[in-house]
Amino acid sequence: MKRIVLICLVLGLALTGYGYWGALRDPTVRTATIEMAHWPHGQSPLRVALLSDLHVAGPDMPPERLARIVTQVNALQPDLVLIAGDLVSDKRVSTHRYSEAEAVAPLGGLSARHGVVAVLGNHDHWRNTAGMLRALEANRVTVLRNCVIARAGVILAGADDDFTGRADPAALIRAVAPLKGPVVTLSHSPDIVPELPQRFGLVLAGHTHCGQIALPLIGRPATMSRHGDRFACGLIREGSRTIVVSAGLGTSVLPVRIGAPPDLWLLTLTGPAAPTTATAAR
């Protein structure tokens, strides 16, 4: 009996160590080219970096690690950086809790010719909404809360956090209605998708962590989504709409990742592909 307990203890420690190593990995850079309706004629493709769920806190995501990720993002030379919320973390096992200013300070080093735009997540609101807004704005990050801005030839529609009931899809729909051009929606949670019309052709989100733990056969024990695995992870196409859900960079609850490594996305947005010569001749 003691031998069985010892074996289980060793296996548990090994799995925990493996999960912690997984949480500390450099984020995988995932890429996709997305053709968008209403793309302005003659406009060049737009390179967009999507970051999500930074969850700055010790031990796994101190500001120093986020600064290294910022350097990684800058090396990709994005035209625009979008951040899909949850910049801080207050998990009970944290070894250090950083202030809002300390947590987001590395973001001031992001370099993109069309700037950095973010929305807030549930952890940001649970911590200190006003403090997060001040810290982000001090680091040249534009925060959208159920509003729309024009940037780099696209309409950026930023939803406030759906998980805490702050999203207002109707406000976004009203704001977009009189505008022309492709719509890029930034939301912390992907659960807002079914509430948006097809005009909102691209939705970028995080929140699910791709499960954070995804086990063989068992799958993802939780995604924190009302829709289960529908928007759990990655690039999803539903009709004419594309949804991209990042696994995020940091962790929640426990500083471990198994089967769901940290990631960020580099998206190339462009207009619909031109028809081939043969097709055009018909």
Image (spheres, rainbow, N blue to C red):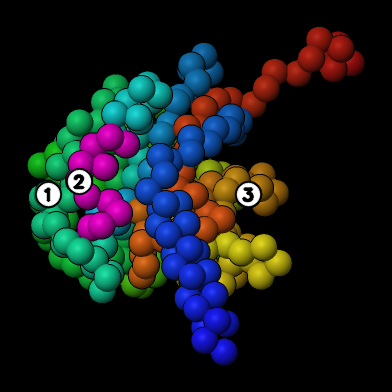
**Element marked by disc 3:** strand
In the image, residue 277 lies at what x, y percent? 81, 10
**Element marked by disc 1:** helix
Which residue is nearer to you in this view: 191 or 55? Answer: 55
Q: Is residue 212 magenta?
A: no
Q: Are marks 2 and 1 in contact (CB under 8 Å)?
A: yes
Q: Quadrant of the C terminus?
A: top right
In the image, residue 94 lies at what x, y percent? 24, 66
In the picture, the disc for residue 102 is 1
Q: Check the image and report above or below for 220 versus 36.
A: below
Q: Pick whichever of labels 3 and 2 is earlier in the sequence.
A: 2
Q: Pick whichever of labels 3 and 1 is earlier in the sequence.
A: 1
In the image, residue 183 lies at what x, y percent? 47, 40
Which residue is nearer to you in this view: 42 or 233? Answer: 233
In the image, residue 184 lies at what x, y percent? 46, 41
Q: Give, as a three-letter code, the residue at label 3.
A: Ile
Which residue is nearer to you in this view: 122 or 90? Answer: 90
Q: Check the image and report above or below for 165 versus 186.
A: below
* Mark 3–mark 1 distance (CA, rounded to whole Å): 34 Å
In the picture, the disc for residue 63 is 2
Magenta region: 57-69
